[in-house]
Amino acid sequence: MYFSNPSGVSNILARVTGGNASNILGILGVDGGANLFIINPNGIFFGENARLDVRGSFVVTTASGVQFGNQGVFSATTPQQPGLLTVQN
């Protein structure tokens, strides 16, 4: 599975909102140089054939979300929260 990397995007944040662990069994990558952050509070497992194709940083966590200062939380457990992230050039 590859994540799209539009021009100007430097960080990709993905969250898994279901109740299952993520099983990475093949290639996981980014079509560009962006950093990739994956959140799944139910776990993330890498199989023996798992490979990363990420030129930027790669971070996975089993946290329930990520706090962005006063902007709020990017949550995997309460995803109905409104969008929190803004882009400034």
Image: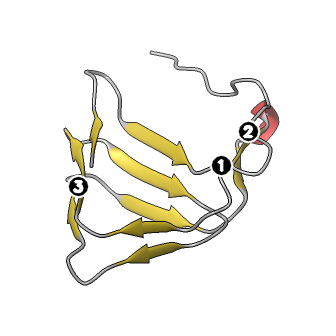
Disc ID at residue 79: 2
Counting other residues with Cα less than 10 Å from the Cα at mark 2, is it few (<14), some (14-19), or many (20 or more)?
some
Q: Is residue 61 left or right of residue 34?
A: right
Q: Earlier in the sequence, mark 2 or mark 1?
A: 1
SS for callout 2? loop
Which residue lies under the disc numbered 1?
17
Depicted 47 relative to depicted 18: above or below: below
Q: Residue furthest top?
A: 89
| Three-letter amino acid code of the residue under disc 1 | Thr
Counting other residues with Cα less than 10 Å from the Cα at mark 1, is it few (<14), some (14-19), or many (20 or more)?
some
Q: Nearer the viewer, mark 2 or mark 3?
A: 2
Depicted 60 relative to depicted 73: above or below: below
Q: Earlier in the sequence, mark 2 or mark 3?
A: 3
Q: Is residue 82 left or right of residue 89?
A: right
- Image location (x, y in percent) of residue 75: 72, 46
Counting other residues with Cα less than 10 Å from the Cα at mark 3, is it few (<14), some (14-19), or many (20 or more)?
some
User: Badges 2 and 3: C-beta atoms under 8 Å apart?
Assistant: no
- Image location (x, y in percent) of residue 18: 65, 52
SS for callout 1? loop
User: Badges 2 and 1: C-beta atoms under 8 Å apart?
Assistant: yes
Residue visible at 23% across and 65% down in the picture: 26
Query: What is the C-alpha distance between the residues marked 3 and 1?
Result: 23 Å
Q: Quadrant of the rendered structure where residue 69 is? A: top right
Query: What is the C-alpha distance between the residues marked 2 and 3?
Result: 26 Å
Q: Earlier in the sequence, mark 3 or mark 1?
A: 1
Depicted 14 relative to depicted 62: above or below: above
Disc ID at residue 54: 3
Query: What is the C-alpha distance between the residues marked 2 and 1?
Result: 7 Å
Along the line of sight, the residue nearer the viewer: 64 or 89: 64
Residue visible at 70% across and 53% down in the picture: 65
Q: Quadrant of the C terminus?
A: top left
Q: Quadrant of the rendered structure where residue 34 is? A: top left
